[in-house]
Amino acid sequence: MIRILNRLIKKHLSKLSADQGVKNFITDIEDVFKQQKEEKEFMERTLTLSFEELNQINASLKDNLAKNRENHRKLEKIVAKQNALFDASTEAVFSFSNDSVIEKVNQAGIEFLNISLDEYDENEVHTCDLFMARIANVDKFNHDIDEIRHNSDARIHGFFDTVDSKHYEYYSVPEVVDGDFIGRVWCCRDITNIRENEALLKHQANHDALTDLPNRVMILDALNHAISLSNRHNTLVGVLFIDLDDFKKINDTAGHHEGDRYLIEFAQRVKSALKNGDIIGRLGGDEFVVIVEGINDVLDIIQINERILALCEKPFYIKDKKYYMSCSVGVGISPDDSVDAEELIRKADMAMYQAKKSGKNTYHFFDDKLDKIALESVLLESQLREAINNDEFILHFQPKFELENGNICGVEALIRWQKTPEQLIYPDDFIPAAEKNGLIRDITYWLLEKACKTMVSWQNTSMANIPMSLNISALDFSDLNFTTQVISLIDQYQIDSSLLEFELTESIFFDDIVQVQQTIATLKSRKIKISIDDFGTGFSSFAYLRDIDIDYLKIDRSFVQNFHQDRKSHAIVKSIIDVGINLGVEVVAEGVESELEMNLLAAEGCHIGQGYFMSKPVNEKALCTFIEQRL
Ligand code: C2E
Ligand code: CA
Ligand code: CA
């Protein structure tokens, strides 16, 4: 363009004089154009340069973008993998925020919460309450995890049970980002199967595989425990070593399989003869051990021995064949024979050999003295059975007197056992045994019926309308049939039941108090009077005096005898009389042996007296004479 302009100027100005000014003007224009050209060239160079740089930058950006995309893909892969791992975990995993909101939970965690996967809405806010609702013993759990409340860095580990009886092991670790605590992760593992297997293994280690009874290891353990408890409570522990008689014969004739069945059935039978808390174990072969805890009297052991021997009286059926089998029992008693479990079993084993030696199907105590007692007790039991069948009991009667005026106000019926015409046995010598062996039920029935018959025979005589009190054992009282029997006898004999009085000892209140109340209410509905016998010697709780509707309190004769000479007995007698007066209950003093005692009792306000001073217990004929003389 400059060149065109230059030519045009030269063409048009050539005719003009070569004026210096015009020349300069042209030169200036040329300079301007030159400069412009240079600038343009510079610009063009600069533009070329920037474009290249831009291209470079663009290329580098593209590169970075590609790398970022790749990284992103990698990260996504990692997160997906982690999520899959998280959900595939059989452990319940929870991530809690600082304010105890569940921020993340895996599938096992949702299942742990007892929510179905479809129902769980991730967008809803779930707090740790959902988690806590699953824990069985929340107080214990809170106590166990207390550390994390004071120390957010704490990593803890422990165990809990769920409300549906599963066992869990847990780990809890803090979640920290750039040094900031942002929450906590909990991993909970279901260890129910592990625990069950552990329990099973423990059970197998402690039990006999055939009968599932405790084995020697566990028997020794239980026996040691029983011995130390009995030491503390001052009671006895009995160990019965049982060995089947001629068990080998069964194995030899019927085979081992049938022998095994026999052992299992024998174990079940023995179990059924024991009380809750008694333990039966198998030492191996045909040897069993029974541990009887918390007994006060060897009579209890004698009863169990008898029951075990009686179990064998029923036949066992093996392959439809009837077998009669017996066993021999040896007994060791702790602490008398030993306070060491192994030694006690050894001694019971030795006693068992004695039983075998003396003809099998019997029992022996390690201590010979006890064998004598056992013999007597068993003899007594069989004789008592005969006494019931042969009607060998009789009643004596002891009158009771109103202390105010000396009038007879009733009689107490006292049982005696006329064993032979010459031998009269008093109740203290057979009632306790009858209570132990259960014969008391029959004796009480006899007593009730005899009392009814006697009252019928007294009708239309001077003895009519005399109240009669009967001693009823606590065992009778806890028998659900007792009241039915009483009522049916009253109806059968058509007696005036308001003349009947039942003397009960405080031991009836050891039983279910509601049942005692019901029994008393039933008796009272027939106007039968209730008296608390031997008051002051039992556990004398005032609670039952409040809760139970009684008519008489009988002061035990141990307080009455010589009470005027003993300051403490006097205080007790006076207090019982006061309690009776304040409760509106009549007080009877038994065992009054002197006029002085009788007068003092009357002076203290006691209502009724009974004792050798007024009359000993006498037979029916003597009672009639006694009463007629006083009319
Ligand atoms: P218990 O109910 O305390 O009966 C009073 C006992 O004290 C009677 O003895 C009686 O003979 C005796 N006794 C009465 N007055 C005096 C006295 O002034 N001095 C002395 N030292 N003793 C006196 P028993 O007849 O030998 O009866 C003893 C226990 O046997 C009775 O004590 C009672 O718990 C029980 N018992 C008596 N008969 C029966 C009965 O038919 N069934 C039941 N389950 N137990 C009975
Ligand atoms: Ca009595
Ligand atoms: Ca008494």
Image (cartoon, rainbow, N blue to C red):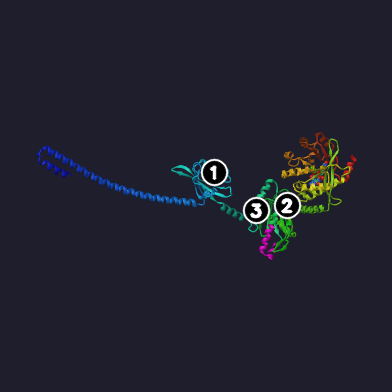
Along the polypeptide, which appears first: circle 1 or circle 3? Answer: 1
Q: Is residue 264 magenta?
A: yes
Q: Position of residue 625 (x, y in %)?
A: 89, 43
Q: Which SS does the magenta portion mostly show?
A: helix
Whether ligand 1 has any atom under 8 Å from the Cβ at mark 1 is answered as no
Q: Amino acid under label 3?
A: Leu
Residue 301 disc label: 2
| Local secondary structure at mark 1 | helix
Depth order, front residue of 195/12: 12
Q: Position of residue 319 (x, y in %)?
A: 69, 64
Q: Classify 10 Å Cα crowding around label 3: few (below 14), some (14-19), many (20 and above).
A: some
In the picture of the structure, the residue carrying the numbered disc 1 is: 129
Residue 580 disc label: none
Q: Position of residue 532 (x, y in %)?
A: 77, 41
Q: Which residues are magenta?
A: 246-267
In the picture of the structure, the residue carrying the numbered disc 3 is: 220
